[in-house]
Image: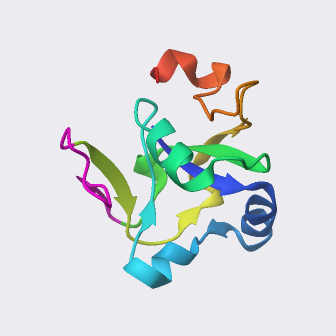
Amino acid sequence: MILHIISRADWAAARATGAVRAAALDDVGFMHCSDPGTVHLPAQRLYAGRSDLLLLEIDPALVAAPVRWEPGDPPSPDALLFPHVYGPIPVDAVVGVHDFAPDASGVLRLPASLAELGTT
């Protein structure tokens, strides 16, 4: 499974159209995703302080677009790879939707509902 961070409003729009289509798809040609062990990295860098987020749990086998594991932007000093989806993500490929709210200290962490998939 791969994970995609999305706002509640964008998820509602995706459900209405049948696909998730983040602005990054037009900007850089792919949509950024993570795995359970790395989702905290882009979450803290790009979404700190936000309380309107969800994590979409996606089955890449249900995505028609190519999914490639590539270096992040900026590249991680640990040479971590992140899944990039080179096209829209069909709503039908989303197998779970999880609240992604900051904890009491304001840190975005992998939700308990995904804890069996990885740790942060």
- The residue range painted magenta reads 66-79
User: Residue 36: horizontal and vertical position, in percent?
Assistant: 46, 32
77 is within the stretch colored magenta: yes
| Most frequent secondary structure within the magenta stretch | loop
The residue that appears at 71% across and 34% down in the rendered structure is 102
The residue that appears at 24% across and 42% down in the rendered structure is 80
The residue that appears at 76% across and 63% down in the rendered structure is 15
Q: Is residue 58 left or right of residue 48?
A: left
Residue 20 against residue 56 in the figure, above or below: below
Q: Quadrant of the N terminus?
A: top left
Residue 101 against residue 90 in the figure, above or below: above
Q: Nearer the viewer, residue 21 or 74?
A: 74
User: Residue 98: horizontal and vertical position, in percent?
Assistant: 70, 36
User: Residue 117: horizontal and vertical position, in percent?
Assistant: 48, 22
Q: Nearer the viewer, residue 60 or 52?
A: 52
Residue 75 against residue 114 in the figure, above or below: below
Q: Nearer the viewer, residue 67 or 50?
A: 50
109 is within the stretch colored magenta: no
Q: Which residue occupies the extreme front position in the image? A: 105
- Residue 14 in which image quadrant: bottom right
Q: Is residue 118 left or right of residue 111?
A: left
